[in-house]
């Protein structure tokens, strides 16, 4: 979960978003939502952040089909669509959307007041970028069966 | 009726999402209000147990460093004892010792989960109700203060760190009796803020901050940190002071839990007086 990195005191990239990114597409969507909820909840219990991770993870799990349709266009509706077959750039855009939405929800809930909007914006931007970079590194590390 | 059922089937994902989101939102709001959930936290038997196991590995690796820290603390305490005997001719006799023992009771403990980078930080310790720990006991490190016990289970307890927006402790400037509230502005994990010190008090950078006397949780004169910078607040009537903590909040292991034996009596007295007027 990388919650010990704390670079510059507040940057804790969240790698578990990759789970949402990798989860098989043609599965039951309700089941996927529940799985995402449980994933977020587990992380929340362990890091005493009830329940920011849960809310954020459930949100991106719910929005995932729309994001995919937006990023991959008509390709997404075909039966034999595979994440590894689309260009690298589209994959990254898709991941970036997930990370950004996740972090927006997360930090809005964590700070929980609009009085500190500068703090929220700073956190969302910086942590999103770091999370994205780390997620890309991790995803290239584990995508061995591509060719 | 058919239509309603059709509607539910068609939008079942949306409804499920809203349902789950509302649950998590409810938890969030609950966690932002006074106390956190009693069961879903890192001090219950499952999460506490996992943290304890992982901690037993990492603590073995850091054993040497921790030993050095403890030796240094021992050295300081011995120094204190010797100086007391020779300089002031007051031996730490049984009478004095008994009176200390009478007021406060100290339980040693170890941190199994530390956190300092969130806005509301909580720390988990490896002692719980079985070892006599209850809510609202103070927690200190060998060099400074750490927080207040907020929740306990049988074997673990959870501490609300001073790095928490809900934390509000009583602190004073050394050698004066002017006290204020110690809060955290969430910016830096080694800096906390002291507010409500009146303007007429003379302070300078480097002054030591100690715990104040008007708390029934901490004994008086426990070191907190030194003044790093200060400024008048917007109404120009009191200072807001940045304090450099003596603790390195990211690197602590052994802590002491302080049990004030007179706490109940003090609280009872205070509540009775409040009811009276």
Image: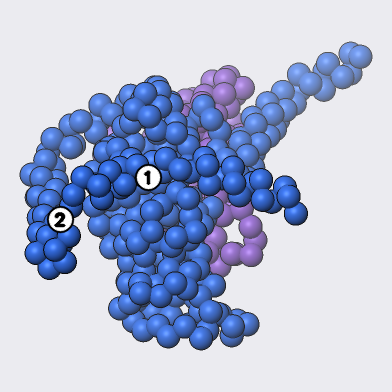
Chain colours: A purple, B blue
Front-most of residues B218 and B12: B218
Give residue B262's position: percent from left, percent from top: 46, 43
Name the residue at 51% across, 29% down: B40
Disc 1, SS: helix
Name the residue at 39% across, 33% down: B133
Give residue B157's position: percent from left, percent from top: 40, 33
The quadrant of the picture occupied by the C terminus of chain A is: top left
Mark 1 burial class by Cα count in 10 Å: few <14, some 14-19, many 20+: few
- The numbered dot on residue B103 is 1
Residue A100, compared with residue B7, is above or below; it is: below
Disc 2, SS: loop
- The numbered dot on residue B203 is none
Q: Residue A139: tell me if it is visible.
A: no
Q: In screen coordinates, is B125 left or right of B163?
A: left
Tell me the residue that label 2 is attached to.
Answer: B91
Q: Are marks 2 and 1 in contact (CB under 8 Å)?
A: no
Name the residue at 54% across, 30% down: B38
Determine the image quadrant of residue B222. bottom left
Q: In screen coordinates, is B78 left or right of B50?
A: left
Name the residue at 30% across, 78% down: B206
Front-most of residues B29 and B10: B29
User: Residue furthest toward the right?
Assistant: B1
Chain of the residue displaying label 1:
B
The quadrant of the picture occupied by the N terminus of chain A is: top left
From mark 2 to mark 1, how far is it between C-alphas?
Answer: 19 Å
Front-most of residues B108 and B96: B96
Chain of the residue displaying label 2:
B
Give residue B90's position: percent from left, percent from top: 17, 60
Give residue B241's position: percent from left, percent from top: 44, 75
């Amino acid at each position: 979960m990388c919650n010990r990195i704390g670079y510059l005191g507040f940057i804790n990239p969240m790698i578990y978003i990759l789970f949402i990114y990798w989860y098989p597409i043609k599965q039951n969507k309700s089941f996927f939502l529940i799985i995402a909820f449980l994933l977020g909840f587990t992380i929340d219990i362990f890091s005493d952040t009830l329940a920011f991770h849960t809310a954020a993870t459930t949100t991106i799990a719910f929005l995932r089909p729309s994001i995919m349709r937006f990023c991959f266009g008509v390709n997404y509706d075909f039966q034999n669509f595979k994440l590894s077959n689309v260009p690298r750039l589209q994959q990254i855009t898709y991941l970036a959307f997930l990370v950004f939405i996740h972090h927006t929800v997360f930090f809005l809930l964590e700070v929980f007041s609009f009085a500190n909007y500068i703090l929220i914006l700073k956190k969302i931007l910086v942590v999103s970028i770091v999370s994205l970079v780390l997620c890309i590194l991790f995803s290239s590390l584990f995508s061995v069966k591509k060719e | 009726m058919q239509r309603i059922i059709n509607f539910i089937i068609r939008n079942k994902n949306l409804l499920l999402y809203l349902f789950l989101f509302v649950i998590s939102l409810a938890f969030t709001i609950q966690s932002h209000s006074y106390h956190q959930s009693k069961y879903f936290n890192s001090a219950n038997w499952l999460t506490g147990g996992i943290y304890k196991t992982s901690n037993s590995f990492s603590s073995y690796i850091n054993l040497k460093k921790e030993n050095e820290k403890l030796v240094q603390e021992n050295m300081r305490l011995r120094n204190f004892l010797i100086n007391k005997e020779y300089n002031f001719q007051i031996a730490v006799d049984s009478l004095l010792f008994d009176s200390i023992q009478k007021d406060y009771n100290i339980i040693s403990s170890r941190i199994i989960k530390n956190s300092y980078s969130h806005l509301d930080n909580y720390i988990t310790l490896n002692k719980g109700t079985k070892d006599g720990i209850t809510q609202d006991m103070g927690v200190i490190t060998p060099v400074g203060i750490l927080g207040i016990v907020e929740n306990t289970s049988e074997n673990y307890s959870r501490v609300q760190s001073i790095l928490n927006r809900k934390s509000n402790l009583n602190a004073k400037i050394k050698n004066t009796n002017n006290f204020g509230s110690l809060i955290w502005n969430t910016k830096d994990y080694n800096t906390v803020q002291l507010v409500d010190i009146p303007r007429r008090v003379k302070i300078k950078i480097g002054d030591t901050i100690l715990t104040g006397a008007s708390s029934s949780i901490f004994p008086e004169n426990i070191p907190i940190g030194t003044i790093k910078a200060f400024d008048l607040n917007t109404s120009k009537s009191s200072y807001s002071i940045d304090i450099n903590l003596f603790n390195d909040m990211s690197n602590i292991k052994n802590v002491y839990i302080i049990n004030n034996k007179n706490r109940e009596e003090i609280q009872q007295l205070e509540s009775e007086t409040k009811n009276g007027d």
